Image (cartoon, grey):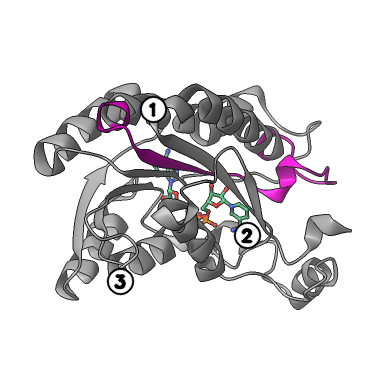
């Protein structure tokens, strides 16, 4: 099993790509911490995984809150004694152009998508350093790499994650900790459901992708699984694109 005996924290784990990862990781025998602001959905997922013989603990977390991270750390370490993997997956999306975006919404997007990953990294790093190993995976987006006629705060927050990954990877390599980014293109989840609700919007999105379709949550989950497992033990500081060729054009 690819994640046997590994304690894995996934943020934003209750839905979409996070939930898909958790189901994959459970099959690979991870000991999961399902962290999300959505308590009902998070508890349901933890119960589902436990009922199928997996190991899953739900902890309510707003990634933008430093005190929530302290509680999560305390609960995780008292239960599992170590942390092997952190996936900074939680994210929120906004489509407003820079001209239309409000300062408050800009702050919230940056707080969840970028500060959340910073706080998560800071929270787990001491424990990982003391065990001389760990893998942190930040979930960015192709909007970090290319401009678009919609959005702005979201792409800027995801571009910040690329830099956070590079700095964290350099600063922690000597402690045996790897830090990488997964960069998904459009993936069929709740997050982009409005963009693809009408057949025209969907066809437009798909027409831009060389592989001709949107990605699935599992297709991102498998990339994260690789970076979480020891199979990627010589891989740090990278951006692993899972975008159907979108940014190769
Ligand atoms: N769906 C896409 O097309 C796409 C593309 C590129 C990148 N991504 C990124 O993948 C990640 C997962 O996205 P998704 O598509 O599964 O989205 P989603 O909206 O389906 O799920 C996001 C999850 O994050 C949780 N969340 C939101 N704010 C939170 C907070 N403050 N603290 C803790 N949890 C919080 C939500 O409750 C939800 O469970 C995000 O970082 C997103 O930006 C998604």
Q: Residue 178: give x, y in percent of width and height.
A: 47, 38
Numbered range of the magenta stretch? 128-154
Of circles 1 and 3, which is in front? 1
Residue carrying label 2: 192
Q: In which quarter of the image is residue 204?
A: bottom right
Q: Estimate how packed mark 2 is, as few (under 14), some (14 to 19) or many (20 or more) residues with alpha carbons within 10 Å.
A: some
Q: Nearer the viewer, mark 3 or mark 2?
A: 3
Earlier in the chain: of badge 1 and badge 3, it is 3
Question: Circle 1 — which element?
Answer: helix
User: Which residue lies at the image location 35% right of the left edge and 45% below the top edge?
Assistant: 85
Q: Nearer the viewer, mark 2 or mark 1?
A: 1
Q: Which quarter of the picture shows residue 136?
A: top left
- Image quadrant in which you'd find residue 245: bottom right
Question: Circle 2 — which element?
Answer: helix
Q: Is mark 1 within 8 Å of ligand 1?
A: no
Q: Are marks 1 and 3 in contact (CB under 8 Å)?
A: no
* Residue annotated with mark 1: 175
* Nearer to me, 236 or 29: 236
Pick the front one: 139 or 223: 223
Would residue 80 appear left or right of 11 to someone viewing this image? left
- Which residue shows up at 17% across the image and 67% down it? 50
Residue at 42%, 60% in the rendered image: 15
Q: Where is residue 40 in the image (x, y as percent from the top left)?
A: 26, 56
Q: In this view, does 148 lie to the left or right of 10?
A: right
The C terminus - image quarter: bottom right
Q: Give me the C-alpha separation between circle 1 and circle 3.
A: 29 Å
Could you give the CA–CA distance between mark 3 and mark 2, rounded to whole angstroms? 27 Å
Question: Can you tell which mark lies on residue 27?
Answer: 3
The numbered mark, 2 or 1, whose residue comes first in the sequence reads 1
Question: Which residue in the rendered view is the most extreme toward the left?
Answer: 78
Which percent across, then down, holds residue 61?
31, 39
């Amino acid at each position: 099993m690819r994640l046997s005996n590994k304690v894995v924290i996934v943020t934003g784990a209750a839905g979409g790509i996070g939930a898909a990862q958790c189901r994959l990781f459970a099959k690979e025998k991870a000991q999961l911490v399902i962290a999300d602001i959505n308590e009902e959905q998070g508890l349901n997922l933890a119960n589902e995984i436990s009922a199928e013989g997996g190991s899953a603990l739900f902890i309510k977390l707003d990634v933008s809150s430093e005190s929530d991270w302290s509680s999560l750390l305390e609960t995780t370490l008292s239960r599992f004694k170590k942390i092997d993997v952190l996936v900074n997956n939680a994210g929120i999306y906004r489509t407003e152009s820079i001209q239309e975006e409000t300062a408050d919404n800009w702050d919230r997007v940056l707080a969840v998508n970028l500060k959340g990953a910073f706080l998560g990294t800071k929270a787990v790093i001491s424990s990982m350093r003391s065990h001389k190993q760990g893998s942190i995976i930040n979930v960015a987006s192709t909007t970090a790499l290319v401009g678009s006629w919609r959005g702005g705060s979201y792409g800027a927050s995801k571009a910040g994650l690329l830099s956070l990954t590079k700095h964290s990877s350099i600063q922690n390599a000597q402690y045996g900790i790897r830090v990488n980014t997964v960069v998904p293109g459009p993936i069929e989840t709740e997050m982009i459901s409005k963009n693809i609700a009408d057949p025209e919007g969907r066809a437009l999105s798909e027409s831009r992708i060389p592989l001709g379709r949107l990605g699935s949550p599992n297709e991102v989950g498998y990339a994260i699984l690789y970076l979480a497992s020891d199979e990627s033990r010589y891989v740090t500081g990278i951006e692993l694109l899972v975008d159907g060729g979108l940014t190769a054009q």
